[in-house]
Image (cartoon, rainbow, N blue to C red):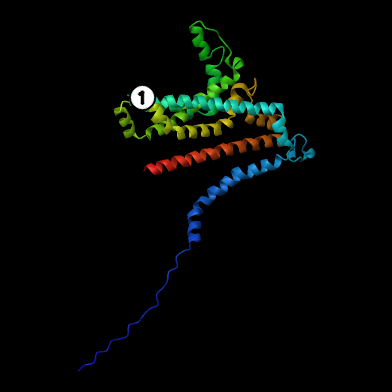
Amino acid sequence: MTATTTAPVATTPMRTTRRPSARLRAWATRAPLLPALIFMIVVTQLPFVATLVISFFDWNSLYPDARHFTGVDNYQEVLTDADLRHSVWTTVLLTVAVVLASLVLGLILALLLDRKFKGRGVVRTLLIAPFLVVPVAAALLWKHVLYNPEYGLFNGLLHYVGGPQPDWISNTPLLAVEAALVWQWTPFMMLILLAGLQSRDHEQIEAARVDGASDWQIFRHLTLPHLRRYLELGALLGSIYIVQNFDAVFTITSGGLGTANLPYTVYQSFYQAHENGLASAAGVLVVIGSIIIATFALRVVSSLFREEVSRA
């Protein structure tokens, strides 16, 4: 009988690897975004805080030693001064007119581009071009190439048919600014609404056609309800930008003839009257209004994403 012996097996202690905590992983994921976040805070938030502080002071840059704290007096003056109230009304009127006209024209162009025809890509590119023009260049184009009473295109066409030769900017100043902005913002609305049209359920539309629905009935009962969110998004985004518009008013009319909107009034108060406190208060009100509109825009965008996810 032979005895078998087994040599003891040497056991090495297991090394336990610690996984990084959830907080550490979260910071590691967000770390690449920190430079962009810091840059955004330095560029946008710190100047806004400085503007907010200045808005509580009676501060004229021509008399820097006479500045003193006045509380909310600058805001009261912005809301009660007749010229400033007129600029607020002009801003509202300009924004509403441009947004509504751009939406209607953008919807018509989007419906046309949603059809298949030869050269659709070229037409789409040409229609998008006005939105890609620099705002100041677009305003100069309308002021000199189209509106000029001596050599403008509009008066040239009227002269060709024997019509009158009006001074467009002097006779209809606000309408002249609105037309230039509508020309520039219609492609933006068209792109948003075209995206909405291309996201429709085509099987539902074909079923409606089989049931005998006309094109108007399909548009009224299927297309228009589907485009409601896209119309809201276009209106809100357009309002955010047009409320802050300065280029067209400054270039075409220089704020004269009753076309001075709130951004132009801020410019006048700061650079011409040197009233830093008053201009800062008006600027803060513009930012607050833009934030309110942007909040509604973000809600509309979120609802659009939820609808797309539910369809997928």
Q: Position of residue 21 (x, y in %)?
A: 48, 63
Q: Is residue 201 visible?
A: yes
Q: Where is residue 234 drawn, in percent x and y?
A: 49, 32
Q: Work out whether residue 147 or residue 221 is closer to the camera in this orientation and state it.
A: 221
Q: Is residue 221 left or right of residue 164?
A: left
Task: State which quadrant residue 94 falls in.
Answer: top right
- Residue sticking out furthest to the top: 162
**Residue 233 x/y as whole percent:** 49, 35
222 left or right of 150? left
Q: Residue at x 59, y 13 (%)?
A: 167
* Camera-side residue of 124 and 91: 91
Which residue appears farthest toward the front when viewing the image?
211
Instruction: Judge the density around disc 1: few (<14), some (14-19), many (≥20) Cα neighbours within 10 Å.
Output: few
- Which quadrant is the N terminus positioned in? bottom left
Residue designated by label 1: 215
Is residue 8 or residue 80 the one in the foreground?
80
| Residue 275 seen by the camera | no
Q: Residue at x 49, y 26 (%)?
A: 102
Residue at the (67%, 40%) spot, across then down: 51
Q: Amino acid at mark 1?
A: Asp
Give above or below for 4 relative to 282: below
